[in-house]
Image: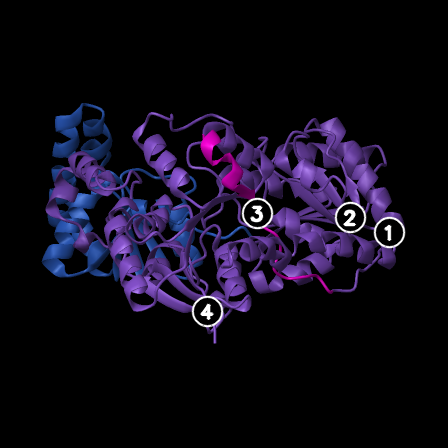
Amino acid sequence: MARMPHLLYVAWGFPPARTGGVHRALATANHFVERGWRVTVLTAEREVFERHTGSDPGLEGAVDPRVNVVRLPFRWPAKETDLVRWSAARVLMPRLWWRWRKYLDTRRFPEPAYGPWAGPLGDAAEAVHRRTPVDLVVATVNPYVDAVAGQRLAQRHQVPYVLDYRDAWSLDMFSGRTVHAADSRVGQVEARLIEGAAQVWFVNEAIATWHQNRHPSAATRVRVVPNGYDTPSTFEPRLRRSAPVFGYLGTITHHVPVRELLEAWQMARADGRLPSDAQLRLYGFLGYYRGADDSMARLVSGSEDLGVHYRGPVAKGEVQSVYADCDVLVLAMGSGQYITSGKTYEYAATGLPIVAVHERGNATTATLAEYPLIAGPSGLDPADIAADLGAAAELAAKVSAADIASARSWATRFDRAGVLDPRIEELTP
Amino acid sequence: MRVLVLQSRARSRDPLLDELSAGGHRVDVLLTPAVLSRWFWRAGPICVDLSRWLVAFWWLAAPSARRRRAHADLLVAADESTRLALWVTARLDAVATVDGLTAVVHSLDDPAH
């Protein structure tokens, strides 16, 4: 019987973590197993997520039992909240302590906080390879230190590695500004990592192209692997003919054009483009903190008389029921040609009408350009958004169950399995 | 749990206090004397260090501060000038102490939804 190919998957943030990219990491590991690979995951110990980043134990249950998860210790002195564990130097000379900490963090790998993991991670990768020879390493970054495992096995044992970059290290995706010059330490480390990789994955064309331009010799090894959705929607659409409910689901930060959306909502209600009983429900955290961002809270709570209601965060398990109660989904996103969001695919999977509230030049515009039930984006001027809201209300008023089924069918191209399968096939020996 | 938050100035809205209150804790806030923290902090780096020590002495010696902390199960340092005071207390009395600044700054962890 042929030996199963062995994937070493490196993801600092793996369930039960609730960190960015964790759903993609989970899906990637599971899909490799389903496609006949033996999978070993290298990740940080559970306590890191329980103590520092928040954890979702339910997510751990979604890991395929055939995946072998190896957890490595990870020290995070900067996030230590227990004062009794602080050294005298940290308390008495905080500025000096921070400088020393930064030096220690970046001495081996230029990534504050995560750099010291490079050594243990490389050693662990070697240990896994000694026990069961590894055929491929896939590392999902950030943190970028994850890439070290693949680089180590490539240099010492000629094992190919893939970098699942998702976003970017040297590019600020909101401003489009280069944050690490090519001749900086990060720039040089990154160039070596990309140069040595068998493939480099990015979530959208815009980010991929930026990297192809910066690393032309690696251009043919760059692949776009969009995020996709994990749970297909199966709820029965409500098909309300009046009092449409518009829903936004996602973290509400200053990058999201909420102010423009609310102004547009008021305009569209005033001039009749939106029915007077239309509702806008906002779900999600206000700002990045668990405690609500004060200015965001004031912003979203001041328009109740206009039918705008802030409903708070939603647990992952309740997301589908929130979608089921909406007639139109509001895809409000930050600006920048490199910006996409996981909710784009999840929204599309519902088959519901979507009103796009973001810049036309945003990477999401192309993703949903052929979605059958899309209104906008016309731009971020409130007058343009108001027009799009009106168009979305018209869509919601005449949409049929068949239209929604058809939109769901169109969105199956973003099913995570479909997104990953071609890449896995390409990499299978 | 009875939580005592030691801070150098009152804030109209505070994510740390919000979070503690949301967790169902009984939260009590103790402000350090303004003369020790705010005034010294305006006067330069040496005074900043001096300010930390003065706050620590006040915290350990002042009867009002001693009374308040005697009833607390958890002490929280809400800003940099109060860390030294609570660090010393944690060493002397083995009381649970948390650096509130670190706890709040590193709550940037919630998932997309």
Mark identifier at residue A4: 4
Q: Taking A374 as reference, is A337 left or right?
A: left
Task: Locate residue A220, reporting x and y percent.
Answer: 53, 38
The residue tagged 1 is: A399
State the separation of the CA atoms marked 1 and 2.
8 Å
Q: Nearer the viewer, residue B26 or A339?
A: A339
Residue kind at label 2, given as amino acid type: Pro
Q: Nearer the viewer, residue A253 or A176?
A: A176
Q: Taking A185 as reference, is B37 left or right?
A: left
> Over which residues does the magenta segment extend?
A215-234
Circles 1 and 3: CB atoms closer than 8 Å: no
Residues packed near mark 2 inside 10 Å, few (<14), some (14 to 19) or many (20 plus): many
Residue A216 highlighted magenta (yes or no): yes
Please give the letter of the chain rendered in purple. Answer: A
The residue tagged 3 is: A225
Residue kind at label 1, given as amino acid type: Val
State the separation of the CA atoms marked 3 and 2.
25 Å
Circles 1 and 2: CB atoms closer than 8 Å: yes
- Badge 3 sits on which subunit? A
Residue at 21 percent across and 34 percent down: it is B37
The residue tagged 2 is: A353
The mark nearer the N terminus, 4 or 3, is 4
Task: Locate residue A42, reporting x and y percent.
Answer: 36, 60
